[in-house]
Image (tube, coloured by chain):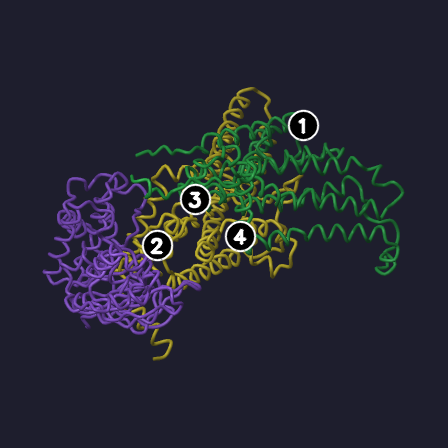
Chain colours: A purple, B green, C yellow
Amino acid sequence: MSDRIQFENVSKFYGEVLGVNNVTLSLPPGITSLVGPNGSGKSTLMNLMAGLIQPTRGQVEVMGFSPRRPEAMFRVIGYCTQYDSFPHSVSGFEFIYGWLRLHGLDRHQCAALTNEALQRVRLTEAAHRPVAGYSKGMRQRIRLAQAISHHPTVLILDEPLNGLDPMARAESIALFQDLGHEGMHVIISSHILEEVDRISDQVVLMSHGYVVAEGDIREVRNEVKDHPIQVLIRCSNPGSLAARVFGQDHVVEARLHEDGGGVLVRTRDADSFYLLLNQIAREGLVDIDAVAPADDDVNSIYQYLIGGGAS
Amino acid sequence: MAVYKRTYHAYNGPLTPHRGRFLVISRYCARQMFESRIFSGAVVFSYLPFLIFAGLIYLLNSPMAQGLLKVQGAPPFAIDNQFFMKFLQGMGYFALILCAYAAPGLVSMDMANNALPLYLSRPLSRIEYVLGKALPVAAVLSAVTWVPGVLLYLMQASMAGGGWGWKHLDIVGAILAGSALWIAFLTLVSLAVSSWVRWRIIATAAIVAFFFVPAAFGTAVTLILRTPWGELLNFPYLNTLIWYRLFGLEAPYWSRFPNVPLPAAWLTFLGLSAMALWMLHERIRAREVVRG
Amino acid sequence: MSAVQRIRSFVLDSPWRLWTRQMLAVVRMELKKSVITRRGLWIYLLAFAPVAIIGLHALDMKLRLAHPGSRVHESLSEDTQVLAGIFQFYYLRMGIFFGCMGIFTWLLRGEYVEKTLHYYLLAPIRRELMVLGKFVAGLLTSTLLFATGVLLSFALMYWGLGGEGEQFVFAGPGLGHLGAYLLVTALACVGYGALFMMLSMLLKNPIVPGIILLGWEGISPVFPQAMQKLSVTFYLKHLTPVAVRAEGLMALFTVVTDPVPKWLAVFGLLALSSFVVFLACLKARTLQVSYHTE
């Protein structure tokens, strides 16, 4: 049996809308984070893994199992989706117990596993209350409990930290870390890299349905840091501005915009560059009309992901 | 905040007239309805009886067509009140199906998405909201009831000549009044049901069941208790009863019992319409009571 | 591997025990959802509404029978006809039809609407088993409720007729009638259930095609027999114990078809339904979850 999650040239289109395009990935054991802005294709990738949707092209395999054989695959997978919905008038206990019965386990085994999972997410006391009355954090935890209740080897968590308060976030992250240390293959999606990079062994960065970077978390972070960003400055005297900024170490490139009304600057240190720009504005060397990130590509996505603002 | 930082300005440009503003809702509803190709197809298909009835009018008024089709002797039917009544009766069922398809999503989707507060936080009253939703439904139902009915009447009047149109002006009145009654009832009931059910699929089922299940139960009551009053639950029957009267015709017996009195039919319709209005009044509010 | 070998290996090597357990788990969950909740109240109403009216009638008959000279004999034949009318007109065409529409449509479409289908799809269970389990649960619910409704209607109708009614049931053709009514009820649930479950898997809003189906069931007698065979009522008509006399509007609802052997009617309907359920199972294998507001 393979110990990897494999995507081979996988594409998914919803009609004319792109979900993910031409994804080829091989995820090793450990904690893997799928990171990207909303709509980047993280959930699509996870749903493809679990067979909730089928690829338009390509093949997916989880630990050697095809999603077309759910009866075998879901013995080793637990998937905590981001759908915050539950069967009507079900209690936390019934929710997990009923689902375990679908595995074909007998009543005693199901009850024991249910109690164990409830204990793990610390919901034992609320177990027999209707899920409809749970708080957002409790609902998130009960879904997590269901996903881990059958002792899977792969745990997929779609935006598990969404809507949680800082306390619940910290608790959840600690739990994921524990599960990872126990040898579980954990895949977490998030739209903020900083949120998950502390616990991740590897990361997959996604944007607009494409995988833009993948690999060891340290390598990706270094790549993010080293990669220059491009800024367009609309101003009255672009030539002077270009000459002034080009003298700085962190500025890689400064060139006049095609329409002659601005300068395109590529810098390795955005913070230092913006400080310099403030200084130039105060000096009155040029009249600045507008400053905007000029690239909508990987760099701006990186900035967004590491918390540098919207791309 | 420093004055120079205050860049926000409220909109003070021209506004559309207040009276017709609810038509924005109608426009969107109409677009939503016709986005479905099935619905558009059904509207087109519902004109099939119109074409058949128009063909019959043409055949009865054209000696050339009769000659071509070798029709001899007296025609088996006449173009009279009965003819238009049968047409409207058939179209009434098409109207019911179109209404069941189009209307359920109109309010229930807003409920499901918690969109009512968004609508009603605009300068838009609850009545305007309902009117905006009802108008496209009524328009579609008109397009398959009185509009083709009046067209058939005009066709017959122009082909028959000899003042046929003036002599049978009561038919137009009956078509318009009968259609108006059915359209108003269908629209009110479907919007009311739609406002009480969050899911479109259930709303559709509830609307269909409203017209068929009580009818069956009413007939069961009639059969078991040997009384005509069970038919008060048979709304399509009550509507037909009223239509017969509007067309100046004697209604045939529905079962072996006499028909229910006409005022009872009118009262039932009025009562149900009042109930539908009350349901809309209760549900179309900018707040929601959350239980549990 | 030849087809015979494949079938042999499927029969011998499949984990039937596990599959049975899993299917029973689905059935249990579904029964809990549809039968034992307030949401299922409408099915009870649909199934038992005529029972209340027949109960009133039975009481009335009992009171009248207390007076000497009442003509029970006439009432017996009339009430037998009325019961047949109620069964064909109310139960078969409306109650069971709409009941199955609601129950079987909601089995899968309801999971979409409530955004809970993924819980089933994320369990280690063959999707065909999930569909079969849901179908069996729907069948149990609908058959249990409507058969009980029919049984109570039958019992009350003849109870009201006193000794003559008892005679008809226990010493006459009564029990045969009851058996036939119950068989037709169960078969109607199978037929309509399979159709509605399939429709709910193909369409976002299967109710409108349901109305068209209702129309088809009503007008199919005017079509050639080959086409009539595509309607559920075609098969059921030949199994009902009492023919309903066409009378007034009832004429519109009375199916007139050439005689069909009873065994053919039963197996024809079962074969048609099995084929539809088989298609539903195939469709389930490619089922995808894409929730949106419906």
Q: Residue furthest bottom?
A: C1
Mark 2 and mark 4 in contact? Answer it, CB < 8 Å. Answer: no
Q: Quadrant of the N terminus of chain C?
A: bottom left
* Viewer-side label of 1, 3: 3
Residue C209: which disc?
4
In the visual, does C232 lie left or right of A149?
right
Q: Judge by depth and name the residue closer to the eye, A89 or C280.
A: A89
Label 4 in the same subunit as label 1: no
Residue B121: which quarter of the image?
A: top left
Residue type at numbered disc 3: Trp
Residue B71 in percent (x, y) is at 85, 56
Label 1 in the same subunit as label 3: yes
Residue type at numbered disc 2: Gly
Residue B199: which disc?
3
* Residue depicted at x 60% and y 45%: C243
Residue A5 in percent (x, y) is at 23, 69
Circle 4 SS class = helix
Q: Quote the CA–CA distance across marks 2 and 4.
A: 24 Å
Residue A250 in percent (x, y) is at 19, 67
Would residue A68 be visible to someone looking at this image? no
Residue B262: which disc?
1
Label 2 in the same subunit as label 3: no
Residue type at numbered disc 1: Leu
Residue C133: which disc?
2
Q: Quote the CA–CA distance across marks 2 and 1.
A: 50 Å
* Residue depicted at x 81% and y 46%: B156
Q: Quote the CA–CA distance across marks 4 and 3.
A: 17 Å
* Residue depicted at x 37% and y 76%: C4
